[in-house]
Image (cartoon, helix red, strand yellow):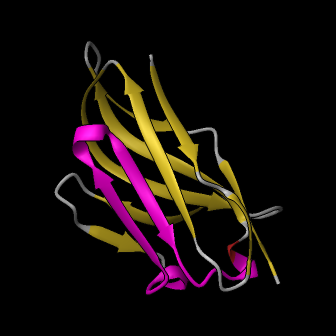
Amino acid sequence: QVQLVESGGGLVQAGGSLRLSCVASGSISTINGMGWYRQALGKRRELVATVTRGGSTAYVDSVKGRFTISRDNAKNTVYLQMYSLKPEDTAVYYCNAELQRATMGWGDYWGQGTQVTVSS
């Protein structure tokens, strides 16, 4: 069994900061790419940021310069540091990981989501 558990969401005023964390646990052999997605009410889920096992990162244009993704491979954890938050960043944020289970092949796994609300 594999679980991805996010934490760190909440309510913040525009211009504020939040740090999301996501820990992967269970019978994990290797984790390849990790990322954060978000889904605002009534909208499709969109990719926010990704990080490879080697630390290469990519961001959607709307968060470049404001968000930073990082990971700790030893802890199977990915982070999303968010600065200068805007009301349009309001969404449920989901953690994603491409990983290999100890006795199975590769698969794509998701966390349950954490709500981020930015008030104006």
56 in relation to 93, above or below = below
Which percent across, then down, holds residue 96? Answer: 46, 46
Q: Is residue 44 visible?
A: no
Judge from the rendering whether residue 98 lies leftward or rightward of residue 117; answer left or right: left
The residue most toward the top is 103
Location of the N terminus by quadrant is: top left
Q: Classify residue 97 by image quadrant.
A: top left
Q: Which image quarter: residue 56?
A: bottom left
Q: Position of residue 82 (x, y in %)?
A: 53, 72
Residue 53 shown left or right of residue 50 in the figure: left
User: In the displayed structure, does residue 59 sit left or right of residue 120?
Assistant: left
Q: Camera-side residue: 52 or 69?
A: 69
- In percent of the image, x 39 and y 65: which residue is there? 69
Q: Report x, y in % for residue 60.
A: 48, 76
Residues rendered magenta in the picture = 61-88
Q: Residue furthest left?
A: 54
At 40% from the left and 27% from the top, the residue drawn is 25
Rendered view: 84 above or below 54: below
- For the image, the number of numbered tags is 0
Write the residue at 59% across / 53% down: 8
Q: Is residue 65 visible?
A: yes
Q: Residue at x 83, y 84 (%)?
A: 120
Q: Position of residue 90 (x, y in %)?
A: 73, 69
Q: Is residue 83 magenta?
A: yes
Magenta span includes 67: yes
